[in-house]
Amino acid sequence: MAVNQYLRWLSGETQTLYWHDSAVISELETALDNGAVGTTTNPFLVQATLKAQPDFWQSTGVFANNVPEGDERAESLIKQVSGYIAERVAPFYSQGFGHGYCCAQLNPNRPGDQALMCDMADRYARITDNIVIKIPATKAGLHVLEYCAARGYNVAATVSFTVPQVLAVAEAFKRGASLCRANGKEPGLGIAVMMVGRLDDYLRDVMQESGGPATEEDIIWAGTAAIKRAYTLFMERGYESILMPAGCRGAYHITQVAGARMICSVAPKIASMLQALDGPFTEQIGQSVDPAIIRRLMTLREFQRAYEPDGMVPEEFITYGSTNRTLTQFCDNGWNLLQTWQT
């Protein structure tokens, strides 16, 4: 087992939590040994583990249910894989905030169908107590998240890249959690994902077309700048939800938030980059992004929309460029493949 000193430091000596971003079991075991206390999955990661370890999943009985092709088959496979992983991390569940969870994502083909997502969330919530239901940060998704929070479900808003999205998520969870307590229950875990690397990817294309002053050296700071601003606002407003940087493209996306009260979603590729770092390691969440970089990024209208707290309204979330790209990947390379999965 490869020892990752950085991740062990992050999860052992700071308030930042480390969740593993993969459903491949061999990778999960390494992550748990290096301090991971939870797991994130999505439809793409579920199909990836079924493809990578078919014999293993055959032995667990994942393919035993004779589910027809289509959405029912995709949902069944996601529930079974995430349920298995949730059981694997369950021993951490009693060890403190954010420990012992596994995420399972709703149908990415239907990000605007509130009724369908609510029904599906009810089914996911029955998998096990430590499942986190991943809901798109669209206008409809915000209503679903509030519905779930009111029922005490664990929730994570995904397909989320911007400051206005995570603020809207925090407010939706706040409303749902208040209703939950009014009904005599304790709310579950609430996570506001910001896919920092995917924001960088989108803005890179915008920058290349703009011909403006922003450069590649600026673009790689865009997601980091957005999540640092969001974190400041979360702390000022006392939100109960916790931010999760995800979709990372480099070690810097993790090192720049070290020390924050966040849950970091770390894929094996990023874990390898962090493993190469030499100590001593330091908390960097309090270090601001260079104001000159922010000024150049602000010449991009799409960065303004992502960075400013009022840069978008919920009706615009589903049409933001990163949203379309990410949903397409989750559908074409994940959910849609699971619909016809053959052992």
Image (cartoon, rainbow, N blue to C red):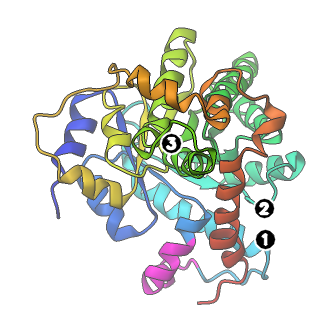
Residue flagged by tag 3: what amino acid is it? Val
Residue 67 x/y as whole percent: 74, 80
Q: Quadrant of the N terminus?
A: bottom left
For mark 1, does the 10 Å Cα neighbourhood hold few (<14), some (14 to 19), or many (20 or more) residues? some
Q: Which residue is mark 2?
A: 109
User: What is the spatial separation of the Cα atoms under label 1 and label 3, in whole angstroms?
Assistant: 29 Å
Q: Is residue 260 left or right of residue 107?
A: left
Residue 247 x/y as whole percent: 49, 50
Q: Quadrant of the C terminus?
A: bottom right
> In the structure shown, which secondary structural element does the residue marked by tag 1 occupy?
helix
> In the structure shown, which secondary structural element does the residue marked by tag 3 occupy?
helix
For mark 2, does the 10 Å Cα neighbourhood hold few (<14), some (14 to 19), or many (20 or more) residues? some
Name the residue nearer the viewer: 17 or 186.
17
For residue 71, the mark is 1
Residue 219 x/y as whole percent: 47, 42
Residue drawn where x is 26% and y is 28% of the image? 14
Residue drawn where x is 52% and y is 66% of the image? 45
User: What is the spatial separation of the Cα atoms under label 2 and label 3, in whole angstroms?
Assistant: 22 Å
Q: Which residue is mark 3?
A: 196
Q: State whether residue 162 appears in this view.
A: yes
Q: How many marks?
A: 3
Residue drawn where x is 53% and y is 46% of the image? 130
User: What is the spatial separation of the Cα atoms under label 1 and label 2, in whole angstroms?
Assistant: 10 Å
Residue flagged by tag 1: what amino acid is it? Asp
Q: Is residue 341 magenta?
A: no
Residue 241 x/y as whole percent: 57, 26
Range covered by the magenta-colored residues: 47-62
Give the main secondary structure, helix, strand or loop, of the magenta stretch: helix
